[in-house]
Each structure stands twice: as C-alpha cells, then as structure tokens.
C-alpha cells in the first residue's frame, strides 16, 4: 500500500488570488485512516479531490508511493481514471440508469475481470454491506442509507489501494451513521487500505481516524493522532474547533483582557515565569474542578473563587456553568453534581491542563516549554515554585 | 527558541534544524524532509503554462469544444458578417448604376435605403409600420393578457387550471394560421379569388378592416397573449403572499399594497414579457405577408422579402441589419431588466405562500371574460379554417355545400391540384421535405446542444466555454428573416471550398441548425448543469476513460434531455416560415412554403388545409414533448 505525499500543494480557482488550499504539506502513511477535519470551506474536500486527480494543482506536487501523480513544475499529471483509487462522493453519485448490481460491478467490468470472479466479488461485497437483496433495483428506489452502502460497495468491489471518502455519512440519520462508522472501521481493519476521510464532524474524526489533519481557511493547522489533537492542540483554532462543549477561552491580550485574566496571569507568572506575551488561555471543561471547601483544591493547581450559575444535565453527564471573577466558565462532569445554582465555592485547574496561546492565537506556547511533557514533573515544578 | 510564526519556522526547518521541531509537528517535518524536496520546487511561468496546456488536452472535451466553436463561428458569425459586408459593397448588376466595379466599397445602399427619395417607401414607412404594429399588438395583449395571467394564477376563477392550458394554445400554433382565418372571414373584392364570408353574405368589409395595420395588430396581439399569461403568470404565482400580508399588518391599504409592493416586484417580469414579445414581433413575416401585401402595407420583414425577391441584395442587407439591430437592442434591454430584477428575487423563501384572491361577485364575469378570449383566439380561427376547407362556396351553410373534396376528392374542376390535399403528391412531397429537413436539422441541433452543454460545463478552458455559450445564443437576437438573408448572402455563390448552396436542402438544414441553437444549447447546458459532475467523476475514478464515460454514463443519463432537445426545435422548425420563404426553392418545398404558394394562387381551401395540418403537428408535438418530459411549456418558453 502506497503512502501519499502532498508537497507545497496549492489550489486556486479561476485565476483568483484566493487560495482554496495554501502550501499544504501532508503525508498519509501506509494503512493509515486519515481524517481531514475542518469547518466548511476550509479546503478539505478540495484536498481530497486533488489526491483523486479530479482537481489539478495550481502549485506543488502530489506523489503516491514513489510515483509523482501531479506536479506543476515537471508538468506531469496522471488522470484520475489511471490512479486506481476509490472515491465515495458526498452525494453518492450513483448512476441513475443502472441497477445496483451494474453500479457495483462497473469497475470490475472496466478492468475486464472474468465473469465468475466478478460475480463472486460483487456477491461478497454486497453481502458484507447488506445490499444483496436490492441488486436489481435502481438507485432512486433506495433510501439514503442504502444508497450510501451501494456507493461504498461500488468502490470496495474493485479493492483499491486508497479509499477516499468525502463526508459520506453526512446525509444519514444518527443511528445509521453510527452503524456505518463501525462498518468503515471494520473495513479499514479487514482490508488494511489507506483511507482518507473528509468530515466536519469532530466525533466522526475522533472515533474513526488513526490520525487527523485539521484544516482552516486552506491551511493545515495540525496533524496528529486524535489524542494529540485533543490534548495538545497546536494553536487556538484547533483547541476551539475540537471539543464539545468547546474549550473555555480566557482572553489575556491588551484591550481584550477579561476580568479573570488577572488571576490567570499572576498564577502563570509565578508557576511558569519563562512564558511571556500571553494572548489567551484555554481550559478544557472536563479539566476544570469545582469545590466548596478551599482545602480540597489540589496543590499546585490554579484556583479562584466562583459561583455556580447553572446546572445543565445532558444525559449521563452534566454541564456546570460557573462565574469566576465575572468570567463565564463551563465545566463538565460525569459524577452527579452535589452543587446547585447559587452555591459559592472555588474552581481549580491542574497546571498541565492549561493551554497558553500567543497573542495571534497561532501557537500553543505551553507546548514550547514542555509544560505538558510530563504531567507529574510539571505539577511538581509548579508546586515547588508556588510554595517558594 | 523558534520564532513566533510559521514562516520563520519553515525557514528554520529548511535550515535542517529538524531535531528541534516539536513532537506534534513531526509529520509535517517529515513531509518537508522527504528526499528530493529540501528545496521547495518552484514552478515558473513557462512550467505553469505547459502544465495547464497538458491538462486542457488530457481528454477530448477541449478539442471537441474548439471544433464546435469553429463550426458555430462558420454557421453563425460568418453569415452575419457577410450580410453586414453586403450592405457596404457593390453587388452584381449594380455596377453601372453606382459606377464602381462589383465588390468595391460603397455607401450607395445605405444612402438609398435611408436618405434617397425612395427611402420613405423602402425603409422609413416599413420601420414606422413595424413599430406601430409592434406597440399596438403589445398594448392589446398586455391589457388582455395581464388580467388573464392574474385570473389564472392568483384567483378562484372557475376552470382556472383548464384555462391555464387552453389559453396558451395560440402559442403552439403558427401566427399566420390566424391571418388565414382572418382573410377567410374578412376578405373583400379588392383582390381576386374566393370571397370572404362576410362579402359572400352581402356585407363588404372595408379595406382597413380586411387588410393592413388593424388585422395585423389584432392577430399579433392574440398570438402574444399567451406570452403574458406564461411569463407574467409565473411571476405572480411565485409572489409570496406573506410580503403582501406584512404590508397589510403595518396598516397599508389595498391600493398602497398594489402600487408599492406588488407592482414594483412584478414590473421586471412584465417588462421581460413585453420585450420578448416585441423582439418576436419585429421579425414576424407570415402575418404581414398574408394581410399586408394586398394593400401594400409593408413591414420591415416583408420589405426585406420584397428586396430580396426583386434582387436588391444591397438594400435587403440594410433592412436585415435594421431588423437585427432592433432585435439586439430589445434583448440587451431585456438582459438589463432581468439583471435588475435579480436584486429582488424572493423565490424559495421558507414558507412562501401563494394565496388566491376570492373574486366574489366578479367570479362569473371573470370566467366569461376568459371564455370570450378563448373563443376569439382559439375556437373562432380554428373553426373558420376547418369549415372553410369543407365548404364549396364561402358562408353558405346549406348541407349540400359541404364536401370533403378538398381533403380527399379526386378529379376536381380546378386547373392545378385536381386531387384533394391528402391525395396530392405535392403535399406529401412537401410533408416529406419538412420531415427530413427539419428533422435532420433538429437532430443535429439537439446533439450539438448537448455537446455544447457538456463542453461548457466541463472544459477547464473557460474562455472557450464563454465563447460557446454566447455564440450559440446569438441567433436568438437575430429575427429569422434577417438570418435567412444572411445565409442567402453567404451561400448564394461559391466561396472557397464550399459550393453555392442556394437551392439545395443543405442550406436549409444549416440555417435551421443555427437558428435553433439558442434553444438547443440552453437545453443542453441546463441538462448538464443539473446532472452535475459527480456521476461522471465517479466513473472516472472507477477507471473509465473519456469515451467510455460518454457512452455508458453521460449519454444514457441524458437520453430524456436529448429527446426534448430534438423535439422542441423540431416543432418550432415546422411552424417556421421566415427561414424557408427566403431559402427554399420549389425542389425543397416544405409545408409552410407550399401553403404560402397555395395562398398566392388563391387555392384558399387547400392552403387552409395545409395550415391546419401544420398546426396539428405543432400542437400534438408540443403536447407529446410535455408528456415525455413532464414539464410545462412555460419552462421552455420562446421556441
């Protein structure tokens, strides 16, 4: 299975200066399940289409294995039909004039696979996806979920090395989506293919991917495992885009500083004096704690007085809305809360769970200083500094 | 410590300080450091151009597009250019009068048409007549069609849905059907041949009622009423009642709502209908030919026909240019109005409501009005024509006077046409000519239209797409008669490798293709747009090459669109008169020119019978097209 390499890949449409994709460098390893994640219009679908060859580059190059498939400088371009990849469209793009069976065996017929083998492969893939009873129907006679399976079957039948999926689950209802997610994960494990999956749904990315590439406004923000993306966001965009409820952001910059920033600043300057020029601080809701007795605050943690302003059950977990120094903070907990609206107490957050961003929001400064390199050491250092 | 932004970071990476890169940027760094790419590859202007060229010719789309562009340049641009040139060059036979060799440049024709002592009868009077007929017809059809559009689309008038179809029947019939019905009724003794019904009954209609401006205006008005019902009615139907309600809730009175809310929003649609009707009016040939010539009432179109048949090619070219100019100006105005109107499109808004007004006491009178219009514009003309073909003596309703001889009789006591029309070999020859000439032209136009649609939607070379879209739409601005004159001018003599085509069926087929391209290409473009790229791209990724994709995916899916793309031009081609009247010769006689000749020779019954046959084909063809495509005529308007 080849790896896919994008180097300085760029795409602009119709001679405009606005770039849909800007200077993209990405490597998708053999057998990887890579999710391209980002809000709509971030260039993720364009990236997928460039890999498939349906969109050509405006600059840079793409290679699959050691073969260059698209390169502006050398003028080489391999047509999509010769790349041997599989692509599932968001709209499914089933051929309305062909039966489900004809849709599925189209690729095999093109490859002139003998009839017996063709039949066997189509039967197997149809069975796997549970669509064998629809084989003589036309796409318009199927529901959205069934059509989606046909689109997958059509692609899997030819067993391509690379599977490209463009938001294939976005038109399904919640239950079907869950089933298909499991199906996709199973397919990835069974066939060991390289999969590139485009989505704007962070849960989909988190549950499926072996690695996630977060994009925004045509630029790659971060590449990493789902955990890396969540725990060590490279910048403020990634921190804010991933996570629900979203990360609490405390603005620290001049002119925008929120009331809570004074407390945060004095804590950080004592605990981590090497950090300067702080733009904002991010606190994950589940990293926050709330206690009514100051003695319960762990040592070395950042703390402050707070009042509970709301308790919102979300089924199995709770969101607690706090007001600390006139700044709103959200906290999530899986334990039934013992507090009620109006209770006074203290919020706290462990030092390793504090994300510090520079004034452009571009970098997670806390990563620079290995703040989170080793949680225990970090906590110890902070403790030592604070007690000094 | 690295700098604060990516640019510096990248520089640092390029400086091979990879070891210091952050853990979470590992992959990115790997990509940068892959063999052979430490230095960023920079593509110069030449490389980019070479790359784009290679992409453009990766599949045959662009090549087909270029071939199509050349074809249309030859079929559309060259004839019109040649016509323009004709107006400024000395024509054969005029060299003595002008005093220059044939082919030399001259202002003689323009002078003669616009400023000479004969200019008034050659140009200015026909221009004035054309404009007054056009404005008169539009004024009448607007006053009748506007209220009808409202009645049909927004009220509880009785039989609303039935009228919505019945009232647009005139639109499916050739306009001069009504002209023939009119002469059948009102013809007086000023010209020979069979008497009109009124004359036969003892009342002699005055000339002003029998021929010229009055009947031409009335008939064109009747023919354009459906325009308003379709276009204006469509806009009214889409009008969201909530807009009206909001005004009312704020305290607006009924007149305020009508003039401040509904009026301004409907104005663009109304303007558009007016302009389209106007553009059609300018090029109308059949009606003034039947009703104007007996009293020498010339419009620009009949003037052009006269100039060409009397071999005054140069003056004809000037007239054709004038018609073309008026058409182009009208459509530019329309384009502007449509663009303006986009500003307040409210279609598709959530919860749009089309509430119907209750007519109350006016319900019956309103229905009566619609019935009256239906009788005058459909029943009376068709009934007159049908009766006229089964009666020996006009307006004699005695049973013995009725006969089917004119349809199926043999050995009649006439000089020519001694058999009934259905047994006449000439009729069948003309019908056969119509079928294969119009049929093959429509088939070519339909296929070319789909091809143009494909290229326009798919080619990566956008100037090519833009050129194809515009050039195929251009004939829409040129009335048929001017277009025919342009073809005559180009193909009358041998030019380069192309032999003189005049007198052959080829010139008719070519001219018809060009004339029908606006509809065919628009249908093709919209069909391809609707299909979208996905199905074809899915096949491409699956490994299908261009040819395979065309034959197994694109064409099979577009079968329906192709059928419509052929059928609609076929119907409008069958009704068409202006192209044939200039370009057809007896060997390429079609039904329309055949019936025109019968009129000239005063075989009234036979002429009417032929026109009825044409009308029947056009009507049932339209109905069939609507059935096949499950659409309403309102969508494919303008053919």
Image: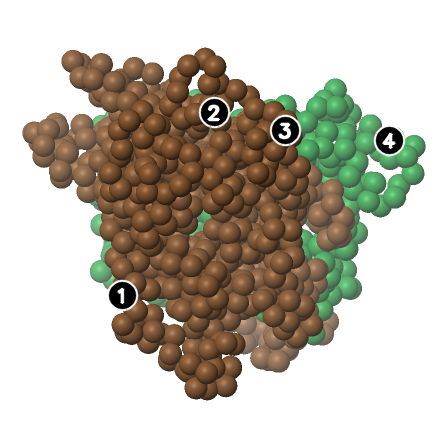
Task: Tell us which disc is closer to us: 4 or 1.
Answer: 1
Lower position in the chain sequence, tag 1 or tag 3: 1
Do residues under tags 3 and 2 come within 8 Å of each other at their CB atoms? no
Q: Are marks 3 and 4 on the same chain?
A: no
Dot 3: chain letter: B
Q: Which residue lies at the image location 25% right of the left edge and 48% below the top edge?
A: B135
Instruction: Tell me if I can see residue B520 in this picture.
Output: yes
Instruction: Tell me if I can see residue B31 in this picture.
Output: no
Figure label count = 4
Label 4, residues with CA under 10 Å away: few <14, some 14-19, many ≥20: some
Q: Which residue lies at the image location 20% right of the left edge and 17% below the top edge?
A: B365
In which quadrant of the rendered view does residue B254 lie? top left
C-alpha separation, residue under disc 4 versus residue under disc 1: 81 Å
- Look at the image and name its color scheme: by chain
Label 3: which residue?
B411
* Image x and y of residue B334, in percent: 32, 52
Dot 1: chain letter: B
Label 1: which residue?
B120
Q: Give the number of the disc on residue A119.
A: 4
SS category of the residue bearing label 2: loop
SS category of the residue bearing label 4: helix
């Amino acid at each position: 299975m080849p790896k896919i390499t994008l180097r300085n890949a760029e795409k602009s449409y119709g001679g405009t200066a606005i770039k849909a994709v800007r200077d993209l460098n990405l490597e998708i390893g053999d057998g990887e399940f890579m999710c391209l994640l980002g809000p709509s219009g971030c260039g993720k679908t364009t990236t997928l289409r460039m890999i498939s060859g349906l969109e050509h580059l405006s600059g840079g190059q793409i290679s699959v294995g050691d073969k260059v498939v698209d390169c502006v400088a050398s003028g080489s371009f391999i047509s999509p039909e010769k790349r041997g990849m599989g692509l599932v469209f968001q709209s499914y793009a089933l051929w309305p004039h062909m039966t489900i069976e004809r849709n599925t065996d189209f690729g095999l017929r093109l490859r002139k696979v003998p009839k017996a083998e063709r039949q066997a492969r189509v039967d197997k893939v149809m069975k796997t996806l549970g669509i064998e009873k629809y084989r003589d129907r036309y796409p318009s006679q199927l529901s959205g979920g069934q059509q989606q399976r046909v689109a997958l079957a059509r692609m899997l039948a030819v067993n391509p090395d690379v599977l490209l999926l463009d938001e294939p689950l976005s038109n399904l209802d919640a239950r079907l989506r869950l089933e298909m997610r499991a199906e996709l994960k199973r397919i990835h494990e069974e066939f060991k293919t390289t999969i590139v999956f485009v989505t704007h749904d962070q849960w989909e990315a988190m549950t499926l991917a072996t690695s996630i590439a977060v994009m925004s406004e045509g630029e790659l923000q971060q590449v990493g495992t789902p955990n890396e993306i969540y725990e060590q966001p490279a910048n403020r965009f990634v921190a804010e885009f991933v996570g629900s409820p979203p990360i609490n952001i405390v603005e620290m910059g001049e002119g925008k500083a929120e009331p809570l920033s004074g407390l945060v600043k004095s804590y950080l300057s004592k605990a981590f004096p090497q950090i300067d020029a702080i733009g904002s601080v991010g606190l994950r809701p589940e990293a926050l704690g709330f206690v009514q007795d100051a003695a319960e605050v762990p040592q070395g943690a950042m703390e402050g007085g707070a009042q509970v302003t709301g308790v919102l059950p979300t089924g199995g977990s709770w969101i607690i809305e706090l007001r600390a120094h006139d700044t709103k903070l959200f906290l999530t907990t899986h334990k039934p809360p013992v507090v009620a609206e109006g209770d006074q107490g203290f919020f706290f957050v462990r030092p390793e769970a504090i994300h510090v961003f520079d004034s452009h929001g571009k970098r997670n400064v806390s990563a620079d200083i290995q703040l989170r390199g080793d949680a225990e050491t970090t906590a110890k250092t902070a403790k030592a500094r604070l007690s000094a | 410590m690295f700098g604060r932004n990516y640019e510096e970071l990248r520089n640092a990476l390029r400086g091979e300080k990879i070891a210091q890169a952050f853990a979470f940027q590992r992959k990115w760094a790997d990509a940068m450091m892959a063999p052979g790419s430490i230095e960023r590859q920079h593509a110069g202007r030449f490389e980019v151009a070479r790359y784009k060229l290679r992409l453009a010719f990766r599949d045959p789309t662009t090549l087909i597009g270029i071939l199509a562009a050349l074809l249309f340049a030859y079929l559309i641009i060259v004839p019109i250019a040649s016509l323009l040139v004709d107006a400024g060059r000395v024509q054969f036979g005029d060299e003595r009068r002008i005093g220059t060799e044939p082919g030399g440049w001259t202002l003689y024709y323009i002078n003669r048409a616009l400023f000479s002592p004969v200019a008034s009868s050659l140009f200015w009077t026909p221009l004035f007549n054309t404009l007054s007929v056009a404005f008169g017809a539009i004024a009448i059809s607007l006053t009748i069609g506007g209220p009808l559009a409202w009645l049909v689309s927004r009220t509880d008038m009785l039989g609303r849905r039935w009228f919505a179809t019945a009232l647009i029947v005139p639109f499916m019939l050739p306009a001069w059907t009504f002209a023939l019905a009119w002469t059948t009724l009102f013809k007086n003794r000023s010209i020979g041949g069979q008497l009109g019904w009124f004359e036969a009954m003892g009342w002699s209609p005055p000339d002003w009622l029998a021929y010229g401006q009055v009947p031409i205006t009335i008939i064109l008005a009747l023919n354009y009423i459906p325009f308003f019902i379709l276009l204006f009615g469509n806009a009214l139907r889409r009008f969201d009642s909530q807009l009206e309600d909001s005004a009312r809730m704020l305290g607006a009175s009924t007149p305020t709502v009508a003039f401040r809310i509904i009026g301004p929003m409907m104005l663009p649609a109304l303007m558009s209908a007016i302009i389209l009707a106007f553009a059609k009016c300018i090029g109308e040939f059949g009606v003034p030919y039947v009703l104007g010539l007996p009293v020498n009432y010339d419009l620009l179109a009949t003037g052009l026909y006269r100039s060409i048949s009397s071999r005054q090619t140069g003056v004809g070219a000037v007239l054709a240019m004038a018609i073309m100019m008026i058409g182009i100006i009208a459509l530019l105005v329309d384009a502007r109005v449509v663009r303006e109107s986009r500003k307040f499109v409210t279609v598709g808004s959530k919860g749009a409501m089309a509430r119907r007004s209750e007519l109350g006491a006016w319900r019956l009178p309103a229905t009566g009005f619609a019935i009256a219009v239906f009788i005058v514009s459909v029943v009376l003309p068709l009934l007159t024509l049908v009766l006229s073909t089964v009666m020996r003596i006009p307006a004699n309703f005695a049973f013995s006077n009725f006969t089917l001889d004119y349809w199926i009789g043999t050995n009649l006591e006439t000089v020519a046409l001694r058999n009934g029309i259905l047994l006449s070999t000439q009729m069948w020859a003309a019908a056969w000519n119509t079928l294969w000439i119009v049929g093959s032209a429509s088939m070519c136009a339909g296929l070319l239209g789909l091809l143009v649609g494909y290229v326009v939607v798919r080619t990566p070379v956008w100037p090519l797409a833009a050129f194809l879209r515009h050039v195929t739409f251009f004939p829409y601005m040129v009335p048929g008669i001017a277009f025919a004159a342009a073809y005559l001018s180009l193909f009358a003599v041998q030019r380069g490798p192309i032999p003189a085509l005049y007198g052959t069926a080829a010139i008719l087929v070519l001219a018809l293709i060009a004339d029908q391209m606006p509809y065919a290409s628009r249908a093709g473009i919209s069909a391809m747009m609707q299909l979208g790229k996905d199905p074809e791209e899915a096949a491409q990724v699956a490994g299908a090459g261009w040819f395979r994709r065309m034959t197994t995916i694109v064409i099979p899916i577009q079968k329906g669109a192709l059928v419509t793309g052929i059928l609609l031009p076929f119907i409008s081609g069958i009704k068409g008169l202006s192209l044939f009247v200039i370009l057809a010769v007896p060997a390429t006689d079609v039904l329309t020119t055949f019936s025109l000749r019968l009129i000239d020779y005063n075989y009234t019954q036979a002429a009417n019978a032929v026109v009825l046959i044409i009308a029947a084909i056009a009507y049932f063809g339209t109905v069939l097209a609507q059935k096949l495509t499950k659409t309403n005529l309102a969508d494919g308007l303008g053919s």
